[in-house]
Image: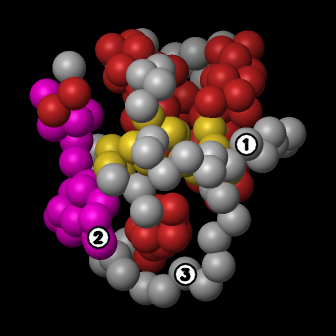
């Protein structure tokens, strides 16, 4: 996977992380078009890490999702991510979540000083906040910014 490393140096931007489950929901039903439109706001800096990008693509290629969207839509999303995500490498990942597979997202939030982690994952939502980063659903995020 090709990554455009366009890490933002602008601390005035609001850093946002969007979890894998929401990108898959977007591919399945385009139900999150309003979120994508909202994230296009120039005040937001979508932050990611290679682990998140790889997880999005890996999950999108699962057999159970093949019936919901064609391969070319996954490629379009991958291209969109390459041009819209600020990429960060994260260091050591301490255990913070009841689902250890989500720990890297929490560490990404801490290391990038993200303000929002938007997710549909109940394990992450149960945490509610890490540092200055609020963990919330799409509906909560949209209500705050729409």
Q: Is residue 3 magenta?
A: no
Please provide percent x and percent y for residue 27. Answer: 51, 21
Residue at which label 2 appears: 130
Residue at which label 1 appears: 6
Q: In which quadrant is the C terminus drawn?
A: top left
Q: Say above or below: 2 vs 115.
A: above
Q: Residues within 10 Å of mark 3 (few under 14, many from 20)?
A: few
Q: Residue at point 22% right, 48% down?
A: 136
Q: Residue at point 22% right, 27% down?
A: 145
Q: Secondary structure at mark 2?
A: strand
User: Of the numbered discs in the image, which one, if any, rests on residue 93?
Assistant: 3
- The residues bearing labels 2 and 3 have C-alpha atoms spaced at a distance of 14 Å
The mark nearer the N terminus, 3 or 1, is: 1
Q: Is residue 34 left or right of residue 109?
A: left
User: Of the numbered discs in the image, which one, if any, rests on residue 125?
Assistant: none
Highlighted range, magenta: 125-143
Q: Is residue 10 left or right of residue 39?
A: right
The mark nearer the N terminus, 2 or 3, is: 3
User: Number of numbered discs present?
Assistant: 3
Please provide percent x and percent y for residue 38. Answer: 36, 20
Report the colour scheme: secondary structure
Q: Looking at the image, which is closer to me, 98 or 15? A: 15
The mark nearer the N terminus, 2 or 1, is: 1
Q: In which quadrant is the N terminus drawn?
A: top right
- The residues bearing labels 2 and 1 have C-alpha atoms spaced at a distance of 25 Å
Q: Say above or below: 75 vs 92.
A: above
Cβ atoms at labels 3 and 1 below 8 Å apart: no
Q: Residue at point 51% right, 62% down?
A: 112
Q: Looking at the image, which is closer to me, 61 or 130? A: 130
- Inspect this view and state whether residue 93 appears: yes
Q: Residue at point 42% right, 22% down?
A: 41
């Amino acid at each position: 996977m090709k990554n455009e490393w366009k890490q933002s140096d602008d601390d005035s931007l609001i850093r946002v992380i969007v979890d894998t489950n929401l990108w898959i929901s977007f591919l399945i039903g385009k139900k999150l078009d309003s979120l994508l439109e909202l994230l296009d706001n120039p005040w937001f800096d979508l932050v990611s890490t290679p682990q998140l990008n790889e997880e999005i693509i890996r999950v999108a290629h699962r057999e159970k999702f093949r019936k919901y969207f064609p391969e070319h839509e996954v490629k379009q999303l991958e291209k969109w991510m390459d041009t819209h995500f600020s990429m960060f490498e994260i260091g050591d990942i301490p255990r913070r979540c009841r689902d250890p597979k989500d720990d890297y997202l929490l560490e990404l939030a801490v290391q990038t000083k993200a303000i929002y982690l938007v997710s549909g994952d109940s394990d992450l939502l149960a945490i509610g906040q890490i540092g200055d980063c609020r963990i919330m659903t799409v509906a909560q995020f949209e209500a705050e910014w729409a």
